[in-house]
Image (tube, rainbow, N blue to C red):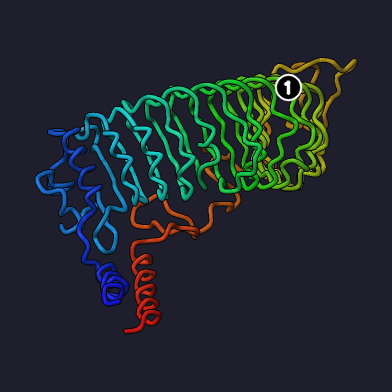
Amino acid sequence: MKRVFFFCVFLPLVVWTGNLPFSPVETAILQDFCQAFGSSLPPVSRFIDCQNVSNVCDRAPLASIICSTPGTSIEQLTIDGEGMQYFNGSLPDSFGNFYTLRFLSIKNTGIRNLPATIARMNVLLTLQLTDNPLMSGPFPDVSNMTYLNTLVSRRNGFQGPLPASVLSSALLVLFENNTQLDGTLPDVTIAAPRVQLLSLTGNAFTGNVPNVNGLNKLTALNLDNNALTGTIPAALNLPFVSSFSAAGNRLTGPLPDDWVSNFPRLLRLNLAQNQITGDFPASLGQHPALNEIHVEGNDMSGHLPSLSGSTNMTVLLLAGNQFCGCFPDKAYFSQHSLYCTIAYSTFCCSDPAPRQCADAWLCLTNNCSCSMTCNYVDGLAAPTFAPMPLSSGGMTPSAGNASLTPGNTSAAGDPPSVLTTGVLVLCLGLFCRIHFGG
């Protein structure tokens, strides 16, 4: 009975008071890390001391390493090569044994790989990989990272297609300017409500625009500057998306008809610089939420439909198509600010007798020679168009989610911390004391 009492009471108190040594597993990882990178490690003042890795949590706080509260393990790790001055080599397979890591950032390094064992980091909240041009090979599967909030890969050297798990892995998924990532994008038809922002711009993806209806909480979708082909799926239905951009691809065919029902919250549509043909969909002119439409640089044709239902429209870019006739709804847009471009188009002459428009700036065809730019009707200067923002209309991930900077690793649904475990074990000890008596 005394042994039971000792086990139930004193052992939990050791956990509670934080008198545990640094994790031997992580000690071994750091030793492998030091051996792998050797002389390319930064000075000891900014990173680990390879002569005594077991005291890493006892040293003065480092910007690159943040430990758990009892000091038994590393929770946040930043590996910064400072312009590829440091960290030239390959990560050891044991790197995936950082089981307690919640924040990992690798940037500006000469690291040549991201081992598949990283999938073992199943309490990771944030994974950021930026400007590591030698980091090659396929991107690992992340399906075991069930707490992941932020997944970012920018300007790395990864090759091949993305695993299907990536598209449904985190609250915010950014794979941008990884120019060797290619292959077709997987469909996501099974409900994956975690993802709110998906940006895959500047890669080399091919094939069709994927069916991502399973991302039923998505607010922004960016597929710019890939090599996507085919038509935009008519079945694509994303009720929370406020920004949809697929500019700079090779999309063809007519646009889907029903944008009001399938994208009811859409604020910004950018399909510029593709090979889209057919008419301008009537539903885009009757969408009460739309602010901007960019379809310049395609091969669309026909008369523009009425736009009077798009009462929030402020930007309409049509240049480089083959629209004909007169600009619709002159009376309506004379009372509203609208910036549009129709210049530099090759206008069609399909009308038996091309109509004369009431105002020159409202002209699409004027005896088949009209080439106009219409500006704000109140004389304001033309706006400057920035690249598509990560989200629009304030529809950003909620404040409770992990940020992109170290130091904030809290999130709804976090894995239990070491401190929480200590409290639970202490309660277990008290229970044992009461239950077994003296």
Return the residue found at the far left.
Answer: 51
Residue 428 in percent (x, y) is at: 38, 72
Return the residue found at the far bottom.
Answer: 438
Return the residue found at the far front.
Answer: 1
Res. 339 in view: no
Callout 1: SS: loop
Query: Mark 1, residues whose alpha carbon is within 10 Å: few (<14), some, or many (≥20)?
Result: many
Residue 240 in percent (x, y) is at: 66, 47
46 or 422: which is nearer to us?
Answer: 422
Q: Is residue 115 left or right of residue 346?
A: left
Q: Is residue 65 left or right of residue 263?
A: left
- Give me the residue at 32% from left, 29% from top: 113
Residue on which disc 1 sits: 300
402 or 51: which is nearer to us?
Answer: 51
Q: Is residue 55 left or right of residue 141?
A: left
Q: Is residue 158 above or below residue 146?
A: above
Amino acid under disc 1: Met
